[in-house]
Image: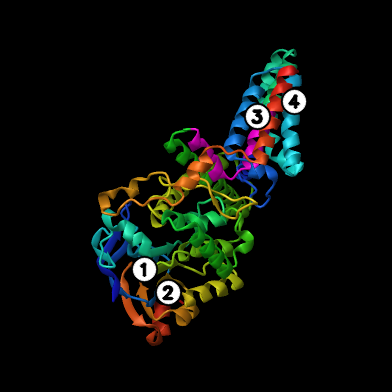
Amino acid sequence: MKVIEVKDVSYIYPDGSIGVKKASLDVYENERLAILGANGSGKSTLLMIMAGLLKPTRGEVRIFGLTPERKNLKIIRKKVGIVFQDPDDFLFNPTVRDELLHVPLQLEWSKEKIELRVSEISKLFGLDDILEKPPFRISGGEKKKVAIASVVITNPDILIIDEPTANIDGKSRREIIKIMKNYSGTLIFTTHELEIVKEIASRVVIMNLKKEVVLTSLVDTLREDFLKEMGII
Amino acid sequence: MHELIEKTLKEASSFFQNFLIHEYSEKTSLHLVDPRLKLIGTFLLIILAISTFLVEKIIVLIASSLILVSFSKISLRKFISRTWLFPVFSFIIMIPLIIANLNNVTYSIIFALRVFTAISLIQLFIMTTKFNEIVFALQYFRVPKALTQMVWITYRYIILMFSEILRILLAREARRIKESSHIESIKKAGNSLGLFFIRTYERAERINLAIMARGEITFSKKTFLRFDAESNLKLESEVVDGGADEEADGVSKLKSPYKSERSKELEFTLKKLDKIYLIYIVVTILIWVMV
């Protein structure tokens, strides 16, 4: 079953620069999709479009069959969770605990359910010791984990993560990879690390510097010389 | 000269970055006092501080705030490091007045002491109250929602703004090989300022997207939580109506399961610590009146 359909989508930023050019791809239920590309190839913009955050200038996006219009956004937000590349942009609550509670409270979960889920997630992500700390006073790896935990807490059907392992240490990296591997829903992520792609992804989308999707392929059939040519490795 | 300005900017960024940060990890009795009471108490004491020129009365208030500091187990050093700059600065701006007439020395000292008292009380309030509780207290006292939301966002991102300035200044310093002339420095400062505005604008755009991604209702529908020693999770307030909850999109409005609990909490049920705090404030006011 297709969960996201991107048809001939282009995005042009207000300053006239191209974000994404004529991209087309489908994402299927429970698949693990990696988006690869050199810096500036439009990966993050494509993720934003797939999460329904940016409205394409041209083309069409359907998320669970719904277009990202205002009337559908509430349903889309519940089903799709996105984590930004820079956690400082993403974390805006006073404490880590508040970050975790941010979406559950909007969903008006019961007190017991919230307590249980917060304790599960903080244990899973190893956040117990920093729950009362302000997010801007924790390390980069912890910030990343908190950002992912604050989205995973509600178990969205689709989890989108932009550069999950960028700028973090080895331990946090391993922990995040483990969490991504164990995630049961549809997973879409961008990365520059081929190792992670091989470990987690089932399919790969490659973008070039013209902001185009040039290839969608199974991980096993990826050719290294092509990746070198694309500036990915 | 430009080095001095740059150094001042750097120190100021570092100082203000820390000024608003609440030390969540240090839980003391004062943290557990109702934020609404603390807001009223702080407000009253500030009013007293700025309405007198009698040194004795100001000393009563300074002593009162310092007793609260020691009671809340905040390190005095940390407390002073967050407050000293303001009275010093206010004294500096009074220097021309002193030069004009030496009789103004006492007035200037009292003025600086008044500033110190007010800043100490504000700092004590910030250091012992979570910022969402402050916003909750403001909303309780009918401060317009638009204003409290603005305060919230400003609080969260002012810290990032200062760290952005600091990063730009540090990045410049890291790549500075030789001393530049004043004109060059001014040009570079202009470039840095431009860069800072662009970065701030872009960050604002990304933050807006993050808020949208994590629920459109983020700041129009707020729930404030308070954690205390008795219960791990205690909801203190209801969900305030938000635009995104309207039935226009066909999704029915959900009822908050915490509504009744919050109504109870809003009734100002004074706990033991709240009563002690209240008595303390009343005693301080009485002493202030009697002195």
What element does badge 3 sit on? helix
Whole-percent x, y for residue A210 in the image: 33, 67
The residue where tag 4 is placed is: B60
Q: Residue at x 26, y 49 (%)?
A: B248
Whole-percent x, y for residue B181 in the image: 60, 42
The chain that hosts pointer 3 is B
User: For this view, does A39 lie left or right of residue A29?
Assistant: right
Going by the numbered disc 2, the residue's amino acid type is Gly
Give me the C-alpha separation between circle 2 and circle 4.
69 Å
**B278 in relation to A189, above or below:** above
Whole-percent x, y for residue B273 in the image: 67, 40
Query: What label does residue B118 carry, if any?
Result: 3
User: For this view, does B58 lie left or right of residue B236?
Assistant: right
Going by the numbered disc 4, the residue's amino acid type is Val
The residue where tag 1 is placed is: A209
Please report the bounds of the magenta region as a residue range: B115-141
